[in-house]
Amino acid sequence: MSAPVESQFQDYCRTLVSVLGHSDRHEPATLYLKGLLLPGERKSVEPMAARVCPENVRSAHQSMNHLVAAADWDDQAVFGVVAQQLAPELLKKEERCWWIVDDTSHVKKGMHSV
């Protein structure tokens, strides 16, 4: 990512993780978000951990997996902070812009459900 984009991403992550409760969730959540945005065909936790934290894949995988599989955080609070950041951008009338909305789905591969 370029420096301005990286800075904006870090600001976005800081805002998002602020509502996750315990501070131990902040780093794995930031790694998870970064993993979703980075190139790579597989967006499951283990390959994302290898991309975002190659020097310590096992620890990153464990903390990211705990965040998405077992941690108790309020999804409505997360949606709330996303809406607070997104709504003002959507309501701007002085600038011309286009929004691309993508459900980020991926084509299923193989015979087993995810």
Image (tube, grey):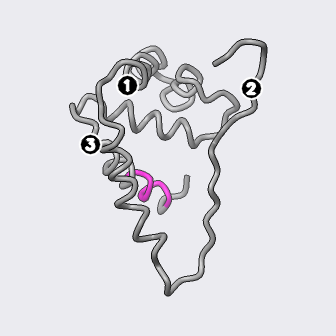
Q: Residues within 10 Å of mark 3 (few under 14, many from 20)?
A: many
> The magenta stretch spans which residues?
5-10
Instruction: Give the labeled residue for mark 3.
Output: 19
The answer to if 29 sits in the magenta stretch is no
**Residue 67 got which mark?**
1
Sequence-earlier tag: 2 or 3 = 3
Sequence-earlier tag: 3 or 1 = 3
Q: Which quadrant of the figure has residue 18?
A: top left
Residue 111 lies, in percent from the top left, at 78, 13
Instruction: Give the labeled residue for mark 2.
Output: 108
Q: Residues within 10 Å of mark 1 (few under 14, many from 20)?
A: many
Residue shown at the point (48%, 59%) measured from the top left = 3
Residue 40 lies, in percent from the top left, at 67, 34
Query: Taken as a whole, is the magenta stretch helix, strand or loop?
Result: helix
Q: Amino acid at mark 3?
A: Val
Residue 102 lies, in percent from the top left, at 64, 50
